[in-house]
Amino acid sequence: MKNGEIAVEEPYEVVRKALELKGHTVSMFNTDENVTGFDMGVIRVINEGHNDELKFPVIAMSGMTIDNVVQAVEHRLTQI
């Protein structure tokens, strides 16, 4: 599995740290920013704000544990 460039919606620093521990490069973003150039994004929920404008696959973390989010990101990265 490749390590990815991941964008994580603010304020989820705990998700950023968990992904960095797995070797991923992680940047935080605000939902009203124009975010490009990432392999994957982690957001709070789908279709809130401008998330439909993101140009990469996203994981919606609503209802997920941090471990579930990390597993979902790593699974999706194997499919890219």
Image (cartoon, helix red, strand yellow):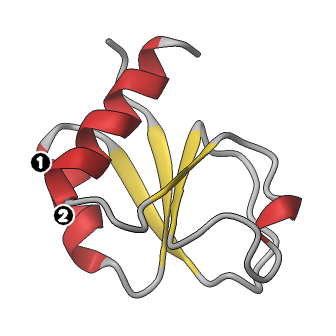
The label on residue 21 is 1
Identified at 11% across, 48% down, the residue is 21
Q: In which quarter of the image is residue 18?
A: bottom left
Identified at 29% across, 64% down, the residue is 16
Q: Is residue 75 left or right of residue 51?
A: left
Badge 1 marks a residue whose secondary structure is: helix
The percent position of residue 47, horizontal first and vertical second, equals 76, 69
Label 1: how many residues lie within 10 Å, few (<14), some (14-19) or many (20+)?
A: few
Q: Which of 8 and 44 is in front in this view?
A: 44
Give the amino acid at mark 1: Leu
Give the amino acid at mark 2: Lys
Identified at 31% across, 41% down, the residue is 24
Above/below status of 3 relative to 27? above
The residue at which mark 2 appears reads as 17
Q: In this view, does 55 lie to the left or right of 3?
A: right
Above/below status of 69 relative to 45? above
Q: How far apart are marks 1 and 2 (CA)?
A: 6 Å
Quarter of the image with the C terminus is top right
Quarter of the image with the N terminus is top left
Identified at 62% across, 84% down, the residue is 30
Q: Which of 5 and 60 is in front in this view?
A: 60
Confirm or deny contact between disc 1 and disc 2 (CB under 8 A): yes
